[in-house]
Amino acid sequence: MIIKNGIITASFDESDGLTCTSLSFKGREYVYFDEKRKREGGTYGIPILFPTPNRVRNGFYVFGGRKIIGNRHGRLRHMPFEILKKRDDMLSAKVSFSPTDDDFPYSADFILTLKIENNSLTWTFEVINKGSEELSYGLALHPYFEKKGCRRLAVNLLKRIVLDEEKYPSGGLSDDIALETDVKKLDEDALFITDGAINASLFYEGAKMHIKASDDFNHAVIYTSPSMPSICVEPQSCATNAHNLYSEGKRDLASLIIVKGGESHKSSVSIIFEH
């Protein structure tokens, strides 16, 4: 499924979590699409990670007195969306969850609106809790951006979250936030707290790409290596293993979004291009 406005063209797979498979600005492609990773069920393009971005220790967590299966990167990225509205430059779609689901056992709707406006593409997310009990979730985008022609990265990092050998947060924070700004030399698989909502920029030959988001997205994962053809700059609303951190009392570090029964929550991420 394609939306466009003459400057930006974006393609999405509505049968596979509305993952963005292509994003071009003035004819140049900025998403690295790996068909092999898609066939193998891995992340590719720009998937939406919900309700459990990144890793979940032991594959489960407890919330509201209930043991819940926690899938790495969440289940939404493989779920088919129901298209609600479609225009040339926007679409809105829905996924519904049920209390019988083992990995998000709530009566809830996930509403996604994708809109191209001028030189930007925006994801707007709304989670509607139709039940009476609280639900909790984390949310992220996992973009694989083309590294070819990309020279420099800048991100408003505040703290590095110290990870253990299995890449789970140990509970500690570090002031060591220095990154190799030359993208070709950058070698990181790290989780950070950002200074407010994420504000990241990738500097390409001829254009800049900015990643900006609503206040919920106060974490960032930076993932690349000199051998990778792509760079991942991931806006996240939470830490890795967030639900288990929350259960351990590390609620600020976890940064879960909690929605009361009968209420809803909105957030958004934008990719903005600039010459």
Image (cartoon, helix red, strand yellow):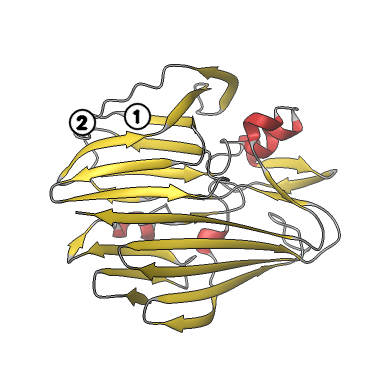
Up/down of 260 relative to 14, above or below = above
What residue is rendered at 52% in x and 75% in y? 92
Which disc is residue 182 wearing? 2
Q: Is residue 31 visible?
A: no
Q: Earlier in the sequence, mark 2 or mark 1?
A: 2
Mark 2 → mark 1, Cα distance in angstroms: 12 Å
What residue is rendered at 56% in x and 36% in y? 240
Residue 262: percent from the left, percent from the top? 81, 63
The amino acid marked with disc number 1 is Glu
Up/down of 246 relative to 89, above or below = above
Q: Which quadrant, please, contains the C terminus? A: bottom left
All told, the count of numbered labels is 2
Give the crowd class for mark 2: few <14, some 14-19, many >=20 residues within 10 Å. few
What residue is rendered at 34% in x and 29% in y? 188
Give the crowd class for mark 1: few <14, some 14-19, many >=20 residues within 10 Å. some
Q: Which quadrant, please, contains the N terminus? A: bottom left
